[in-house]
Amino acid sequence: MVLVTGAAGFIGSHLVTRLRALGAEVHAVSRRPQQARHGEIWHAAHLNDAGETTRLVQSVRPSVLFHVAGEVTGSRGDEVVRATLESNVIGGVNVLAAAHENGVKTVFTGSIEEPRPGNDQAPPSSAYAMSKWAATCYAQLYHRLWDLPVTVLRPSMVYGPAQPDTTKLVPYVTLCLLGGHRPRLTRATKLADWIYVDDVVDAFVLAGESDKAIGHTLDIGTGLKTPAHEIVERLYRIVDPSSKPEFGTTPDRPHDITQVGDVTPAADLLGWHPVTELDEGLRRTVDWYASQESHKESRS
């Protein structure tokens, strides 16, 4: 029996689907009531409420808790400080405390944007990155001081089908092109480590099954740097090869830092490797969004 927080989100929903396919009894958590799609059991809970979180874990008593919930935002504005603090830090600590109290093995979600060897310990460049760093530090603290069996996975730039935030680069450009619109683009020079969502789910499942990575914090990426403009150009070749993107039509986001994962520790401890090539992952993603658009047209 497993418990998945953030189960209605991007990674969480894919993780629930995989775990159910593997035959697990899955208890899924969201802030709002959800309808089961794969036989999972839904719970509505606010994880920034300590009592509510503890009661949830006590009632389910999972063998593994996958904490994937969080406030994800690339904003550089101070208006997101409180939301990321309450969701990612306070919510994360509440989950860790409830897991410790009930002796539950935990797979905790960090971020590639945290200070780490792969980015020369660069300071967080956003409120989101700061909050994820703090939450990871608390996870490490719970392991060191109180022996919580926790593994932290830090996914890099995740893309794939059914990404709820369609302002993210891959769904935004894809949906613009499928709809016959020209996306507004920055110069798209940022280098990032792009990883397909199914590969990320593979890592979570392996971390839940194995004890070898307990106490470790692992990057989950490809180890490859790909500029954002190359992602856009590949999407154009898949969807609209007769057109070319127009870069620089909207301002660049400030303080972006190159983020690339060190995948060797995950390979050594989990036996995990990314398997989806970038072109194949992007093509699967485009196909999914195209099928959704076709369904919309058929219903109208």
Image (cartoon, rainbow, N blue to C red):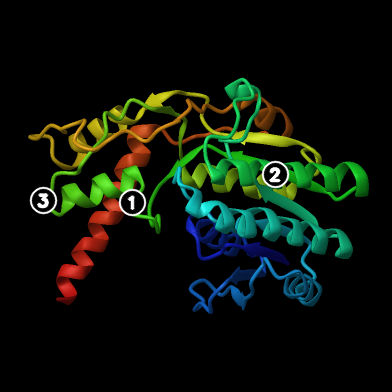
Query: Is 279 situated above or below 10?
Result: above
Question: Mark 1 and mark 3: span between their CA atoms?
Answer: 17 Å
Looking at the rendering, which quadrant does residue 134 occupy?
top right
Are there few (<14), some (14-19), or many (20+) residues within 10 Å of tag 2? Answer: many
Identify the secondary structure beneath mark 1.
loop
Closer to the camera, 267 or 177?
177
Give residue 277's quadrant in the image: top left
Q: Is residue 288 visible?
A: yes
Q: Earlier in the sequence, mark 1 or mark 3?
A: 1
Q: Is residue 264 left or right of residue 36?
A: right
Residue type, numbered disc 1: Thr
Residue receiving disc 1: 167
Question: Which residue was labeled with disc 2?
Answer: 134
> Which residue in the protein does label 3 denote?
180
Mark 1 is surrounded, within 10 Å at the Cα level, by few (under 14), some (14 to 19) or many (20 or more) other residues, namely few
- Tell me: 226 left or right of 222: left
Label 2 or label 1, whichever comes before in sequence order: 2
- State the residue at coordinates (47%, 50%): 73
Label 3 environment density (alpha carbons within 10 Å; few <14, some 14–19, many ≥20): few
Residue type at mark 3? Gly
Label 2: element kind: helix
Number of numbered markers: 3
Q: Viewer-nearest of labels 2 and 1?
A: 2
Viewer-nearest residue: 128 or 61 = 128
Residue 219: x %, y % from top left: 62, 33
Q: Considering the image in quadrants, where does the C terminus appear?
A: bottom left
* Dot 2 amino acid type: Ala
Residue 191: x percent and y percent?
41, 25
